[in-house]
Image: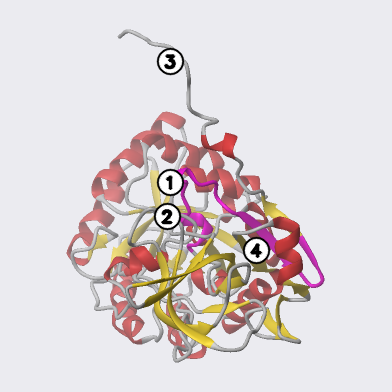
Amino acid sequence: MSPTGFEYRDGVLHAEQVALPLLAAAVGTPAYVYCANTVRARYRRLDQAFAGIPHHIHFAVKANSNLSVLSLLRELGAGVDIVSGGELYRALQAGFHGRDVVFSGVGKTVQEIAQALEAEVQLINVESEAELVVIDVVAARLGVMAPIAIRVNPEVTVDTPHAYIKTGEKGQKFGIPRDDVARLVELTGELSHVQLRGMGMHLGSQIGNADPLRDALPRLLAAIAYAQGKGHPIAFMDVGGGLSVPYESHERDADIDDYATIVRAAALETGLTLLLEPGRFLVAEAGILLTEVLYRKHAAGKDFVVTDAGMNDLIRPALYQAYHAIDPVTLTDGSVAADIVGPICESGDFFAKDRRLPDVQAGALLAVRTAGAYGFSMASNYNSRPRPAEVLVDGDQFAVVGAREQLDDLVRLERMPLQWRTA
């Protein structure tokens, strides 16, 4: 079977053993389709790379927050990396416990910090001095000790496909600047309701090789040694996530062996438990966006393939200028160079520009590849469009794991007539 879980059989694209035309007939389009066995294989590949040293994989929930996907990863032994109170709620609903949770993010509210402490999360990653003080105040009010880690910004150059997915360079909003780490360690020792249990970093997304780690890890190790020298009971070294996946045919997976060799050596040097926070690496290739061609259009010398999915369903091409391979579900003769566009009233509503693909006509199904990460989780109701269904395939069976929104869902939280109040 294809490593992504999607392959052609007799000219028809299947998700594992389920033919996509049959699935589309059952659940409609657009729909996200995820392959469970691909997620399992990706998790085990990364887990085995760190066999023999204490480590724990925390899935970055922002990549795909569907409860069934989270539950699948929990069954494999994963924890979660979260960035909001909503993601904490989802994780708990999926069966995770507080001890499975690392809470990251630069803008945690007082309510979210309290929610995390009440859930007894494993770590809260601190990303500013002001946040550290607030955590101490909230913990004091609750009468608990807050387990924290300091997220170090190692300030290294990271080669990623888009500026928006860099997080470990100088001047980013993420993490504590290198020059400020010692001062924050000192402050932690002065506060009575926080305990410094970890030091971590996250360089960004779509990191294809270990070169940035070669520069960043010594800086993280120096921060760990400083904190330990000040008597803090450091137990965890968190290297974040960001492992790349191939979106285009010439791209390759992250070099896990090289990555593991470098990270393992650093973890062994410290003797700490290693935390890894992959997101895209575990789920991106496991998912597609299944969409139907509505129309073919020719205008001003160009061909357009208009689909029933739009940028509200998958915003990555519009937001990041991201490439997604697009294949017909049923192979067909001929080819055409066309813009593949959606129905949204925006010129930025496209999945591909001047892409050569088989000569599909109205009614044909297309599979937008590598859409299992940052697809549905970034979907919206723009143009008052219900969000698509989500389907999980496991072998020869499938289940709807996210029902398609209906029109009444669009206004369910809105109020008419208004109930006016006065101050």
Residue at label 4? Answer: 73
Q: What x and y, as percent, mark residue 388?
A: 58, 53
Q: Residue at x 67, y 50 (%)?
A: 95
Q: What x and y, as percent, mark residue 34?
A: 65, 67
Nearest the viewer among 252 and 128 is 252
- Please rate how many residues cluster around mark 3, counting C-alpha atoms within 10 Å: few if below 14, some from 14 to 19, many from 20: few
CA gap between label 3 and label 2 equals 30 Å
Q: Mark 1 or mark 3: name the one nearer the start of the chain.
A: 1
- Please rate how many residues cluster around mark 2, counting C-alpha atoms within 10 Å: few if below 14, some from 14 to 19, many from 20: some
CA gap between label 1 and label 3 equals 23 Å
- Is residue 52 visible in the rendered structure shown here? no
Badge 3 marks a residue whose secondary structure is loop
Badge 1 marks a residue whose secondary structure is helix
In the rendered structure, are the residues bearing label 3 and label 2 in contact, judged by CB atoms less than 8 Å apart?
Answer: no
Nearer the observer: mark 4 or 2; the answer is 2
Mark seen at residue 383: 1
Work out whether 270 lies above or below 86.
Answer: below
Quadrant containing the C terminus is: top left
Q: Which residues are magenta?
A: 374-398
Q: Mark 4 or mark 2: name the one nearer the start of the chain.
A: 4
What amino acid does circle 4 point to?
Answer: Leu
Residue at label 2? Answer: 344
Q: What x and y, as percent, mark residue 381?
A: 47, 46
Along the horizontal axis of the image, is 168 left or right of 294?
left
* Residue 163 magenta: no
Mark seen at residue 418: 3
- Please rate how many residues cluster around mark 4, counting C-alpha atoms within 10 Å: few if below 14, some from 14 to 19, many from 20: many
